[in-house]
Amino acid sequence: MLQSKPYQLINALSLGEFCSGESLAKQLDVSRTTIASYIKQYSVLGLDIYSVKGKGYRLAQPLSLLDSKVLELALPNNMPLVFDQVDSTNAWLMSNIDCVEHGQVVLAEYQSAGRGRRGRAWQTPYAGQLCMSLLWRLQDGIEAAMGLSLAVGLAIVEALEKAGFKDLGLKWPNDIYLGGKKLGGVLIELQGHANSEVSLVVGLGVNVRVASLQAEQIDQAFAQLETNAKPPLNRTDLAIAIVESLNQMFEVFRLQGFAALQQRWNRYDIFAEQAVSLRFSEERQLKGTAKGVDKQGQLLLEINGQQQAFMAGEVSLRGQ
């Protein structure tokens, strides 16, 4: 997609090397004052930029920007659409749900209003995460989508494991963990009817590198794929690997449901056989031992010697 001048400037600085204001102004065909005004705006995007007299400007860390041409070649059936900035990829697809095709994937370098489960804000520094949403359609109604968020998390974890990452895990129903800390999550929104076609917008966010400015605003322990790697991880390659894994998973899910993926999901369950609390509201919670998930993707808890299944709630280790 065509980039506006502020995003062209980010692209010019993405290697993490000093660039003079004069050379940047010439490259973008704007004034040095305009370059300086763009730089001031970037803190909103979670970007750390150094300004050194006599040297110019430099990003604190190099960025791996998404390459739309490579994505289009690798994922022709997903018709990749890449935005520099969007309110949220899920919101964009929901707004355009009637005019996009099954399989469409939308990616963004930055989300200004990213959302997580239960409407929580989801922080997304510019080019610091993989933020994407896919549109899938199921012909058998809403019930056929049961367990899909778990299947999506599984596909992401398996793609990351194939890419060489270790100590990955899943927290019911839709969180992705690395080294015991949250790495990302899944948000699924749907539109349709109980017994006919349903459209599913499958959103996901995975931390690649979180800038220090953004890290200060996150109120929980979090993980990121990249720490001090140079050059930075190739986010385009990671996006392709995850989308390909999701495509394969969806075909299995469409034909066989979550039951075909249950055992694979349970292998990554970070709470397996541990004492947990399942909270439904501030006033109501249950305590038991986590026993994985069933063939519908429901959480299994052993409570007073009896195994029970739950479709909703927020699970945490006992005492947390």
Image: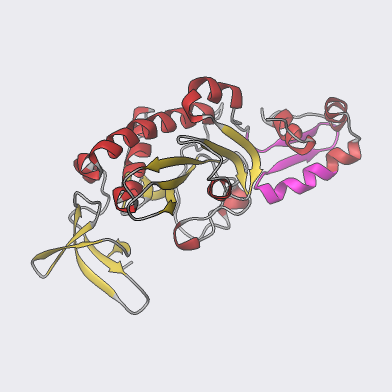
Q: Quadrant of the N terminus?
A: top right
Q: Residue at x 43, y 32 (%)?
A: 243
In the current view of this chain or complex, which residue is farthest to the front? Answer: 196
Q: Quadrant of the C terminus?
A: bottom left
Query: Compared to 317, does 184 lie above or below?
Result: above
- Front residue of this view, candidates 136 and 133: 136
Q: Which percent across, then down, holds residue 5? A: 79, 35
Q: Which residues are magenta?
A: 37-61
User: Does the segment drawn in magenta span residue 111?
Assistant: no
Q: Residue at x 84, y 38 (%)?
A: 35
Evaluate whether residue 258 shows in this view: yes
Query: Compared to 153, does 277 lie above or below?
Result: below
- Front residue of this view, candidates 10 and 252: 252
Evaluate whether residue 318 shows in this view: no
Q: Which percent across, then down, holds residue 267? A: 22, 42
Give residue 173's quadrant in the image. bottom left
Q: Is residue 207 left or right of residue 306?
A: right
